Every structure is written in C-alpha cells, then in structure tokens.
Amino acid sequence: MNFSIEVPGEANPLSLQELCRVLHSASTSHDHSQRQSAGQQLQSWEAHQDYYISLQSVFLDRVLPHEIRLLAIIQLKNGIDKYWRHHMLKNAIRPEKREAIRARLFEGTVGEEDKQLALHNALVVAKIVRIDFPQAWPDAMTNLVALLRNLKDGNQAHLSGALLLLLRIVKEMGTARLRKSQTALQSVTPELVQLLGEIYTSSTRAWMSFLGTGRGDEDDADLAMENSLVAFKTLRRLIIIGYDLPHKNQTVQQAWSLSQTHFGEFLNLVSHDSPIPAPYLDVVGKHLMQFTKLHVEMAETHPASFASLPGMFDLVRSYWDLVAKFAEVFQKSSGLRAGSAATEGENKSKLEGPLLEKLALKGLLVVRCCLRMVNIPQQTFKYRSKELKEEQDQVLRHVKDELLIDELIVQMANAIISNLLVFRKADLDAWEEEPEEWEQQEETGGNAWEWEVRPCAENVLQHLLSHYKALLQQPLLSYFETVKSPQADVMTKEAVYTALGLAASHVHENVNFGELLKSTIAMDAQQQGPLANVLRRRIGILLSQWVPTGITNEIRPLIYEVYAHFLNPNDQANDIVVRITAARQFKAVADDFAFEGEMFRPYAQTVLTELIRLLGEVEIDETKLAILGTTKVIIERMETYVNSFAELIMSALPAIWASAGDLNFMLKQAVLTILQSLVMSMRAESRRYHSVILPLVGEAVKEGSDVSIYLIEEALELWENVLTQSEPPLSQELLNLAPPAIRLLEANTENASRCLRIVGSYILLAPETMLEEEFRRPFLKAISESFDSKSREHLAVATKYSEAYIRLAQELAGVDGLKIVLRDMVESGFLIRIFEGIRDAYVAHQTSGPNRIQAKINNLTLTDYFSILARIAVADPATFVEMLAPFGPLDQVWQWLSSEWFASFDCMSDDNRRKLGLLALTRLLELQQPMQDLVLSKLQDYFSLWASSLAQILGDEYPPVDQLVFTEDLEPTEWDTPRDVRERALINTDPVRHVCSFKFVNERLGGLVQRVGGEQVFQQSYLVNVDVDVVNGFKAIGRPPQ
C-alpha cells in the first residue's frame, strides 16, 4: 500500500530552477491536480521577498519557453496590483526589491521579439510608473526619453519597443484621477510631444517613400509604419490630456496642421483605384482613424481649442464633404459592427467594417460636437476666467456666423433625411439572419450613435431640429408630403417615417398627424409583399413617438387597431421583429397621460392575447421583460376594466414563472410586478386568484430560499397589495402568512418598513386573529424592535399600529382585553423599552453644563412613546396606573414620568397627538387616592397644558369649538380599499375626533374640585400654588371676547 504524503507547497524553497519548474507545471500540465498544486505553490511564494524579482529574472531569460515567461510576467503584473503600492501590507515588496525590479523593466520590452510578452511587460512598466513617478522613480520618464532619442535614428525594432512602453505609460497615467498623476504627466508632455512629432514625421517619410517609389527594404517599411502609428497614438493622447489649453501651444498647432495634411494625403492613398497592396492599405486606414480620433476627442474635450486651432473650418467642411459623399453610397455599405479588442490590454472593442463608413461616422461626430458647441455651450465649455470666457464667446460667434451657416444646416438635414436614414440591405440581412437579436440591439443600443452611422445621423438630426426648427420646418414639411405619393417605394417611406418620428416634438403643431394617419399611414400598415415588414416596424415606432405629442381621442382607436393588426401572427408580413416592436412600442401608447381604459377595452382582448402568445415564442430574456413591461402598463392603465381579461393573464403567468427556472430571477421579478398591478387594478375581485398568488408570496418569504434573497422586495410589495385589497374576514391562506410577516418585521432588515405596513394591515383587517395568544407576544416583540429605527417615518408608522393594537384590544374585549395586552407588553419587553427610554431621558434632562448627559432617545421618539401611553390612559386610566406598578413605587414613577410627559408637549407639532396627550393626562383626574394627590401635585403643569393646548385646539371662535372634532363621519370614496375603510372606521371612533376637549377638561376638573371639598377648599389648598397668570390664561378660554 502507498502511504506517501504530498508535501505542502510552502515546504518547497524558492529558487530559479524550482520557480521555472512550478511555472511550467502551472502553464502546461494537463493534470488538474498538478496545476492546482503549482498554483498553490506560487501563491505561497508571494510572501517571499525574492519571489517577484525572481519572476522578472525568469521572464527576462529569453531562452526559456514562451509559456513559462508569459506566466512569469502575468504573476509579476498581478503582484504589482496587490503588493507594490501598499507598503504596510504584510507581504509588501520592499523598497530595495522594487528598485532592483525597476532597473530592468525597460529591457523586458525593448528588443523583445515576442509582441505578446513585450506588451505584458509594458503593462507592468505602466503600472509601476503610475505609482512611483515622480516620487519613488523620478528619472523614469527622463530615461525613457533618452532611450527614444538614442533609438530614433537607430534600431527601429528596438524603437518599436520603446514606443510601446511610452504608449502604455501614457494610457495608464491618462486614466489617473489624482491631481498628482495628472500634473506629473503634464510636466513631461511638451518634451514628449516634440520628440514623438519628430519620430512620427521621420517614420512616415520613410514608409511613404517606400510606397511611392517601391525602393527600399519591405521589413524596414513595415517597422516604419508600425512606429509612426504607435507614435501618433501616443501623440494624440498627450495632446488631449497633457494640456489645459492645447491651441495655445505651438508644437500642438504644428502637430494639428500635420494631421490635417496627412489626413488628406492618406485619404487619397486608400481610394478605390489605389495601387497600394491591401496590407499597407489597412495600416494607412489605421493612421486615418487615429487622425479622426484626435479631431473628435479635441472637439469633445477641448471645444474652445478645437475651434481655435488652425484650419478648423476647412477641416469640418472636409469632414462634411466626406459624409455627404458617403451618404450617396450609404445604402450599399455593409455597416459597422463591434469586434473584439485588437490587442491584449485593450478595453474597448474595435469597430469593424468599411473604412469609408468609419470615417463618415467620425465626420458626423465632429459635426455633432460643433452643433453642441454653439447651441449648448453650458454643457460644453468650462469657464475659467473672464478673459477666457470672452475668448470663448468670440470663438462661438465665429463658428456660428461663418461655419454653421443656413446653407450648410439645410444641406446637412437634407443629406441625413434623404440618404442616411434609409434602411439598408445590410440591415435587412442582419434582420433576417438573427431577427430577435437584431431587434433587441436596435431598441436597446444606448449610445449606438457613437459607433453606428444611422443612429449618429439621427442624433445629429435631432440637434438640427432642436436648434434650427424655424429654418428646417418648411423643408421638412415638404419632405413629409412625399410619403403620400403613390410612386414612393417602401424604403423611401421608411426613411420619411423615421424623420417624421424624430421630428414629432418639433413639428406636431404644423402637421395634421390625424389626417396623415387615416389617409396614408393606416393604408401603409396594411401593405403586403416584400419589405412590408420593414415598413410596419417603422410605423409601430412612429406611432409611439407621436402619441405623447397630444393626439386627439378621435384617432386613438385607429392607433389601437394598427397595433392589434401588427401583433397578429397569422399575417405573413408580421414577422417576429414586427410583433416584438409593436409589443415594445405599445408601452408608450398605453402609458400616455390621456390613455383611457374604456376606450381601449374593445382591443384589449386581442392585444393581451397576442402579447402573451408572443411571450411564449421569444427566447431573449430582455425581450420577454419588455413584453411583460408593456403588459404591466396596460393592466395599470385599464384599472378595473381589466377584470374581464384577468383570467387570460393569470392563466399565462404560472407557465412564465416555471419557464424562468431556478436562476432567472429577473423574469420572476417581472411576473411579481404584473401580479402587483393586476391586484391593484382588480381590487377586491383579485381575491379569486389568491390560490395562485399566495403560494408565490410564501415561496419568496421562506427562510433560506434563493427566491427570498433576490425577490423579497417584489414579493413584499405584492403581499402588501393583496392585503390592501382584501375584504375581511381574511382567508385562512392569507392568515397563514401572518407569522412570516412578524418574523420578517423582527429581523429588522432594509425591508422593515414594508413588513411593518404588512403587519399593520393584518392588525386592521384581522384584529381578532392578531390579538390571539399565538400572535400577541411575537408581534409586540417584533414591533418593539422597530423603535430602534433611525427613520422618522418608520417610527411614526410603528407608533400608529401600536396605538391601533391597544384600541382594538379594548374595542373587542373591553378592559379585560386591554389588561391582557398590557401584560404581554410588559412581558415581551415592549413597555420596558418605553419606560426605560423615558426614565433615561429624565435623568439626562436633570444634568446641565459640561457634564450634561445625552439621552439615548431624542425628543421626537419620546413623543411617540407618550402617544402609546396616552392611548392606554384614554382607554382606561385605572388600568394605566396599575400598569405602572412593575416599574417602581407609584409616587417615584409619577415624578419622572409626568415631568417628561408634560415637557414633551413642547416638541409636539401635531394637534391630534397634542389633544390625545391632553385627554390622557386629564383622565387621570378621575382617579381616587393615591393618584389624586399625585395629580394635585402637578396642577401647575396641568393648567399650563390646558391653557396652551386648548388655545390651539379651540381656535378663536366663541362659543369655543373643538377644531379636531368631526361634525360628521368621513365620507367614503370610490377609490377606497378595504384597508382604507377599516382605517376610516378607527378614525371615526377615535376620542380625539368625537370628544370636545374644552368640555372634557372642565368636567374632569369639576369632579376633582368636588372630591377635594368644593371650590373654596380647592382654591385655598391647591390652586393658590399655581401661577396666577397661568390660571387666568386658562379661565380666559371659553369666555366671550371683550
């Protein structure tokens, strides 16, 4: 038998030979256990101070296999991220080791023939320079500049490596947000720009000579092209991020002029009849793209500099000429698409497609920047000083008056509308190849204008329409008329409808859309034959764009009919794209402010049926969510009219839930939100679907389930909606969910407020159940935890339901029921929390000066506590006094309790709460000894309370009228839910609402006076101790004005 034990990785000593062996196992072994063991060994060596310098030594040994060297440099790069910057970490790389590593960094890229390895080393260099330059590595850029100068006219292969190092350093430092890093880069920018300009010029001259004459070495030409491209990539970035005002630097002006000159020359090189071989054409095209990136980034980042640099007007006009020429062949172009990153270390994907289209896109972006610069300067310019602002204003006027002239604006609009909005064969091919994916991409493209010509053209047109409406209105209206022509083909109409949709908010006052819909659009919606689906998709989008502009109710039924027609799967022209588009766009139609459920009712059956059928056909989850989103809006906007179609919707939802599986929680979330809307729209009628809804809620609130983790918020909202719309008595299935509600409330999670409202609904709708032995203590313990909340709103709701619980206990079971609840309030800790909080506040308020103690609860929370106590005292004062027994001798408890209670009225802004407290304290006057003497000891506080509170509650009328007393019960409304009805019933029976406070106080005070021996005894023995002004203030209440 084999009793060998595998030695742990950390037992192996670090050496170059052992490191190479482990790297080889980790990178090439087919045995998973060996790779795992090697990975653990490398991880254990991270604590060794020679580990990272050894990795660098392995990487620099060019005799070793590629896989070993690659893993070594990757491990080194990862170590830089973890241990280079953080000096205090246990395994941080020591300063002397960092210095040794820095000394050999450049040689890992300069002279390295393997481009992948050279790039990874350059990434390491960039990370270290960003961290160490200029403090820990002050000569980093100086040494690199010196290296570039030495290689500029020497070994071009080595120059390529040095340029790669600089490119990665500039890219890394350009992403820095710290001012230190930005300043460090700007300090070396002038020298670097000068040097890179020289390298770019000499390299470009070399390869252009080769292409022009055919003489020279092909490999040298390839290197020159590569070096000029990398040099300009770096130069472009430095010009953008290295200067605050690039146009004021002479070197930048020269580089800018050179870019314009070479842009024109290189554009001629890539013409269709160019004799240059394809590989070279590709590199020339990359140079052109770098020029365009410079121009676009300058216009976006430094608009004032862009407008001030030499040749700017000619550059923009040249770009527009390029766009206009491309517009003529736009229909034949194959389109752009996002490809993978060109090289490792690149984050952005590269655009793939025809060069001319990519250049035209950049031209449109430059035009867009110019339009924004002139028309939205507040979002474009950064005003630094008065002089600079004046300069920028002058630049703006110059651009507006001399570049963006009316003739050019009209020309732009015409070219975009006539050519760039046309639906191309490339679009149709993509549609037919992957219809659902194509539709999804078209509708959720986000910033598609940044990388596609048509969306960018639409964006530019929007800017033109927004800021040159008066100029473009008549040409637009004339263009829209062409759609009525019998000779107009499908593609022309599609382009016109696109422009009409984009212009909806700008021309709706001048276009009779209703007439156009009835005479033309409705007819086009019924077209059959080739490309009818293209036209139908566009009409679906068009209608959703025009509905929010304020269409008349007269044409709404026709719009509903068009969408119902587009959703019909039996019509051959309604392919999956048309139907998905109709389903997606109808959301805007249904969500319109003027949408009426009754008007839509005749079409609801068809639309909802087809939406649900479509859900079963589509495969992309985002598309399903969009369709469910439209369904949800329809349900919400139809309100109670949806009742007749509820069965149709409910029958489909379980299948959708099941199809989501165990992990697709987004789809389940959408199902729950639809159920929420359905319950709120159907109101009490939704009860018949509780058998479907409540199991979903139960699953979502089950402890430990995945659904409870991801869908708890939606489930709780649905649960709350169900309770809100449920008539008492509640079903047993709904009552069975009460214990989880209390458990969730006690957990005090971020959903505590919604859980509190759910539990509150159970109290209002099923008070008999919630007052049973099974629920009392758990509820009281859970709601007690709610008073730890920092949310004022949450505390107010907790107080509200605590008061309701006390009132319902008395209403349903009298004083005995109240006593049972109070006993449980003590035993559950609820009242203990309240009295401890009040006692702590009393002790704190007895201190002052530097040694003053801060109370654990604030004054507002104290008023919440006293509102709960007031409910008990108003219900039965004798029971209230009995309740005080567990907290100490009555006279001592009354001392601190009454002091804080009377003082709390100064913090009460709510008159209802003030009156409740007044009634509670006044009811204590009804009690015999020993409470009678305790009350008499606080007469000063009582008269002050009565005088101040009654003055607010009674107002200025005579005879006095309690402003808080209802003369009649609150009237019900048509929108009342069962919960609203129950809350109103509690309000209508609230003593605050039907007891006249002035009369109430006088009666209780009169009773007390009689018990102590009459008015004379009361006056001589007790009232004499009360401030005369306070007594007079109280007596003045209820007297006729003088």
Image (tube, rainbow, N blue to C red):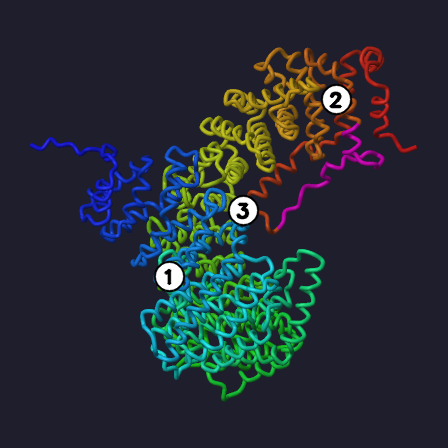
Circle 3: element type: helix
Tags 1 and 3 touching, CB below 8 Å: no
**Residue 483 versus residue 811 in the image, above or below:** below
Q: Is residue 3 magenta?
A: no
Question: Considering the image in quadrants, where does the C terminus appear?
Answer: top right
Q: Mark 3 points at which residue?
A: 180
| Residue furthest bottom as drawn | 487
Tags 2 and 1 touching, CB below 8 Å: no
Q: What residue type is labelled 3?
A: Lys
Crowdedness of circle 2 by 10 Å Cα count: few (<14), some, many (20+)?
Answer: some
Q: What stretch is highlighted in magenta?
A: 948-973
Residue 242 located left or right of residue 233: right
Q: Mark 2 points at which residue?
A: 1004
Looking at the image, which is closer to me, 757 or 319? Answer: 319
Looking at the image, which is closer to me, 449 or 269? Answer: 269
Residue 223 located left or right of residue 876: left
Looking at the image, which is closer to me, 219 or 407? Answer: 219
Q: Which amino acid does label 2 sit on?
A: Arg
Mark 2 vs mark 1, CA separation in Å:
99 Å
**Residue 385 versus residue 25 in the image, above or below:** below
Mark 1 vs mark 3, CA separation in Å:
29 Å
Question: Considering the image in quadrants, where does the N terminus appear?
Answer: top left
Residue 967's quadrant in the figure? Answer: top right
Residue 717 located left or right of residue 155: right
Q: Where is residue 897 in the image (x, y as percent from the top left)?
A: 66, 19
Residue 134 appears in the rendering: yes
Q: Mark 1 points at which residue?
A: 160
| Residue furthest right as drawn | 1042
Q: Position of residue 697 (x, y in %)?
A: 42, 44
Residue 1002 located left or right of residue 983: right
